[in-house]
Image: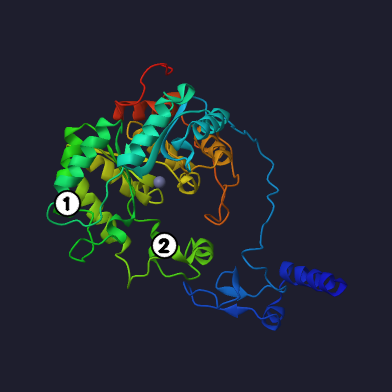
């Protein structure tokens, strides 16, 4: 221990006054402009790389504590009653007891209503709707989207799927979703080929959604880094190393570009159908691209679930984006962990600087508040969802 201290002291001394000869002795290496440092070294002066004098900790263990002293505004409850459009309440919506517990959790975080996006249909959907209608305190606080069963797409499939959708809507479904990412990534047609997101055999279903005035909530692909090589430049290295099944190697899966192109074809081909692209279409790291999509496709909306790390790392650009597209963005959370919602409120409602995200393995950076105006918060929290889903209880919301 003592030896390490002396050694570290010596290193500091060398770092603050590095004579050329000392740099050579301590392993400094010159690189050409634009050339990366060799492995295990970092750039300490222009084109000069050096290795740490101490064994570097693993990125799993390196948790620097911020010394920044700045204003902190915790936001346990949303400023306006919110609708979680991307609800996966983990079984709570199916029974009275579960719904009552769900209500307690939602009260604590300021969420008035949840739209369950669990891809349910037929008996399961009818049971869920019956449980909601049979729980007076929750009757106006939960609604359900209908799922589409994409197995066996081939002759006769579309007519069956449309009949089932009509039955689900008659049973109380207020929209379609969440269309899972497996559409495009892995689902096969009856003939064994990959079912493309823009496959024309699906067209009658999207047309039926327009006729029934229900939006389609669709999750396509995943973060673009999941489709890339897992190397030292991958922003999601730790996540992919923790959860290797989140990777989509090129030789087994279509590319991110292929999937998002198919999705955009679908959106363009069905102008009368309203689509809500989940997770900001996985373009929250490329807001100009998402802006082009929303500009070109007036039938497309988007939802913010599980991409807070990208919104909160670009507070100025994100604020501009949310203000410009305030009529096209819906609040949704995805995974139901009540203690995580306050991070969303803090990003949307405050000007706080440099605070932690809730999943350190998602992001190696801090978040910043984007301080949205009240009129924009209201639209994102509930007004846009009420407009898109006539089947939601429409009374009792703040003006
Ligand atoms: Zn989801």
> From the image, which quarter does the C terminus lie in?
top left
Measured as percent of width and height from the top left, residue 196 is found at 22, 58
Residue position marked by numbered label 1 in the rendering = 157
Residue 275 in the image: above or below residue 19:
above
Residue 242 appears in view: yes
Residue 313 or 85: which is nearer the viewer?
A: 85
Residue at image point 18% right, 40% down: 163
Does label 1 or label 2 sit earlier along the sequence? 1
Which one is in front in this view, the residue at disc 1 or the one at disc 2?
1
The residues bearing labels 1 and 2 have C-alpha atoms spaced at a distance of 32 Å
Q: Quadrant of residue 165?
A: top left
Measured as percent of width and height from the top left, residue 388 is found at 30, 30
Measured as percent of width and height from the top left, residue 284 is found at 40, 48
213 sits left or right of 29 in the view: left
Q: Residues within 10 Å of mark 1 (few under 14, many from 20)?
A: some
Residue 44 in the image: above or below residue 87:
below
Mark 2 element type: helix
Measured as percent of width and height from the top left, residue 370 is found at 49, 37
Is disc 1's CB within 8 Å of ligand 1?
Answer: no
How is this picture coloured? rainbow
Residue position marked by numbered label 2 in the rendering = 226
Residue 216 or 281: which is nearer the viewer?
A: 216
Residue 109 or 148: which is nearer the viewer?
A: 148
38 sits left or right of 247 in the view: right
Q: Quadrant of residue 131?
A: top left
160 sits left or right of 252 in the view: left
> From the image, which quarter does the N terminus lie in?
bottom right
- Residue lying at the far right of the rendered structure: 2
Q: Quadrant of residue 261?
A: bottom left
């Amino acid at each position: 221990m003592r030896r390490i201290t002396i050694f570290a002291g010596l290193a500091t001394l060398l770092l603050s006054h590095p004579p050329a000869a000392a740099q050579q002795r301590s392993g400094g290496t010159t690189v050409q402009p634009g050339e990366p440092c060799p492995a295990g070294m970092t750039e300490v002066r222009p084109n000069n790389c050096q290795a740490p004098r101490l064994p570097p900790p693993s990125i799993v263990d390196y948790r620097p504590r911020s010394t920044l002293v700045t204003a902190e505004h915790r936001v346990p409850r949303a400023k306006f009653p919110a609708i979680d459009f991307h609800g996966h309440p983990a079984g709570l919506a199916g029974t009275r007891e579960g719904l009552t517990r769900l209500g307690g959790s939602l009260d604590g975080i300021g969420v008035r209503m949840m739209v369950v996006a669990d891809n349910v249909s037929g008996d399961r959907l009818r049971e869920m709707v019956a449980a909601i209608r049979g729980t007076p305190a929750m009757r106006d606080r939960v609604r359900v989207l209908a799922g589409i069963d994409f197995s066996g797409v081939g002759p006769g499939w579309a007519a069956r799927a449309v009949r089932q959708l009509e039955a689900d809507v008659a049973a109380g479904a207020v929209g379609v979703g969440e269309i899972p990412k497996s559409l495009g990534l892995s689902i096969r047609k009856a003939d064994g080929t990959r079912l493309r997101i823009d496959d024309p055999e699906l067209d009658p279903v999207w047309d039926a959604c327009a006729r029934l005035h229900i939006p389609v909530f669709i999750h396509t692909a995943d973060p673009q880094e999941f489709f890339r090589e897992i190397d030292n430049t991958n922003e999601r290295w730790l996540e992919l190393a923790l959860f290797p099944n989140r990777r989509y190697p090129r030789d087994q899966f279509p590319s991110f570009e292929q999937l998002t192109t198919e999705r955009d074809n679908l959106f363009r081909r069905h102008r009368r159908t309203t689509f809500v692209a989940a997770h900001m279409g996985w373009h929250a790291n490329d807001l100009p691209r998402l802006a082009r999509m929303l500009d070109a496709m007036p039938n497309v909306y988007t939802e913010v679930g599980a991409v807070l790390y990208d919104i909160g790392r670009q507070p100025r650009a994100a604020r501009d984006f949310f203000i410009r597209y305030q009529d096209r963005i819906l609040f949704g959370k995805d995974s139901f962990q009540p203690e995580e919602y306050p991070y969303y409120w803090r990003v949307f409602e405050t000007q706080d600087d440099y605070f932690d995200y809730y999943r350190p393995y998602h992001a190696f950076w801090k978040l910043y508040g984007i301080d949205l105006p009240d009129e924009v918060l209201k639209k994102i929290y509930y007004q846009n969802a009420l407009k898109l889903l006539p089947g939601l209880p429409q009374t009792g919301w703040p003006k």
